[in-house]
Amino acid sequence: MHSKRYITIERIFKSGFINFGRNIWLAIAAIAMMATTLTILLFAVISSATFNHTISGLTSHIDVSIYLKDSVTDDQRSQLISQLHKVDNVQSVTYISKSQALKNYEAANSTNTDLLAAISETDNPLPASLTIKPKDPDKLQPIRDYISRPAIQALQSDPSNDSGDRRKAVDNITRATHFFQQAGVVGIILFMIISMLIIFNTIRMAIFNRRDELVIMRLLGASTAYIRGPFVVETMTYGVVAAAVSLLICWGIFKVASHTLQASTLGLLDIKYADQFFSSHLVKILTLQLLVGILIGAVSSYVATRRYLKFHR
Amino acid sequence: MILLDRVTKSYNRKGDALERVSLHVEPKEFVIIVGPSGAGKSTLFKLLTCEEKPTSGKIIVGGIDYDKLKDKDVPLLRRKIGVVFQDFKLLTNKTVYENVAFALEIAGIPGDEIKHTVPRVLEVVGLTGKEGNYPLELSGGERQRVAIARAIVRQPKILIADEPTGNLDPKHAWDVIKVLEKVNRFGTTVLLTTHNQEIVNALKRRVVTIKDGKIVSDRAVGQYKAS
């Protein structure tokens, strides 16, 4: 013997699903709307992640190099390295010896025989260097301050090397990164608000079309939960289907058009990463899509039914 | 028992829809309410089903004082009163069977009992075979009978029927009246409005006449002459 409450809950779900089937065109319209907004939202999230990935790829290459005079002894060098390690924000210090620098140079210019010939004729002109990788590429100042001390400058073959154009470029990149990260967050929030309003309005219109139904149920003595329940179930189903559709669309786009997409970004964004991000976060994305879809559906129908559920006119 | 004590309902300043109406209906009574359109019959019914609140006066139905009725208890009250609305108020996206079953579903009646009761009530109103049809596929008279089936399926203590014969040919009108009499014999209080002079006079029941929002006559075995 089932309890009354159980019977009621079962009936609410059942009639929610039946209504879904009977109002299939309305459902398709609402789902199309929800799927579109969820898809755009998903794209916003993925492109923001991809952009951040691209930026972090760029910033990880930001480092400070100092070129050592040939006269610097091994002792002086290892002392300098250990001192550098103590400076704020230093992650690693890599030493590149004169012979290593030459090998690197030769490898980089292996096709240019003229340059290689010029190099080999003279005694290795390339200086040894230290590459200092910062923990946070935004805060290069302590490192710069340290290496511009006169005692340290005395060891360098060309003290001006770390400043100038390169420094400007680094500053520009970090500034751009911040701007785009913030713009991305603001954009996603703004878009979420707009899409919620659109979905809410779609569902409100759908319920407006069926307001007589609500009023009749009320007159027959149905409780608020019993009237509202099936609508909430129905719109939550919209959310579930819309989430699945939007995920399929995204998956399809990455599978079919990733080459075209890659070309269209002019190499600025790494679409392979976007695809990878999408695949590796699939469960998270699906959960998020479902939650957003179900939540928007439920809240919209809850609010939209309220005005038709008055007891007295 | 239905008790109205000096009930007034006004919608605007132009005049009252009901003016100091007092009415007392005993349990198991069969009362016909007559009067021209706009006299206030529908307003009276809306007050009884709690669809409207009186501007002043007291309403007590089945021991429930409407002044003390909380909003959340309104559904419970409505489940005790069967109503046949003038405009049917059927759910267009539900079948005949589902419309009738709906009245039981909202009261939390188990499915087995619904499956047992609904066909019997549909048989009483002569709609066997139309279970799967939607209201828009039915004639006016058939819709009327669905509305009646839905109102009586819960075996309410009080049945309010607003012009249930309005759209019916004489034969079907009498079928409906016979159903109402049958329900009344089983112990349900029936309030009926009708314009059908012939039916009123043949029933030989209490007739309350309302005009311009006031009760102008109340006779134990009333006669009615439509003007």
Image (spheres, coloured by chain):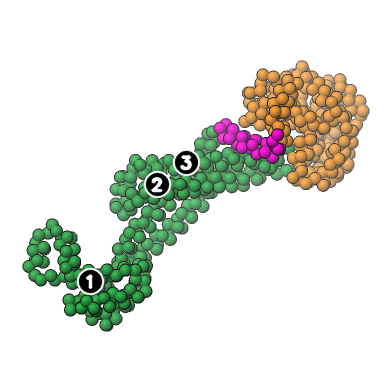
Instruction: Please identify the residue farthest to the bottom as the structure is shown.
Output: A150
Of the 4 image quadrants, the one containing the N terminus of chain A is top right
Q: Say above or below: B119 vs A273.
A: above
Task: Provide the chain ID for the residue under circle 3.
Answer: A
Q: Nearer the viewer, residue A286 or A301?
A: A286
Q: Is residue B28 magenta?
A: no
Residue located beneath label 3 in the image: A244
Quarter of the view holding residue A16: top right
- Chain that bears disc 2: A
Disc 2 marks which amino acid?
Ser
What whole-number distance in Å separates the C-alpha atoms at marks 1 and 2? 41 Å
Residue under numbered circle 2: A279
Numbered badge on residue B113:
none
- Chain A's colour is green
Q: Please give the name of the residue rendered at 14% of the width and 58% of the height, measured from the top-left corner.
A: A110
The percent position of residue B193, horizontal first and vertical second, equals 81, 29
Furthest residue in direction right, as rendered: B220
Q: Secondary structure beneath disc 3?
A: helix
User: A274 or B201: nearer the eye?
Assistant: A274
User: Which residue appears at 20% of the width and 70% of the height?
Assistant: A97
Identified by mark 3, the residue type is: Ala
The mark closer to the camera, 1 or 3, is 1
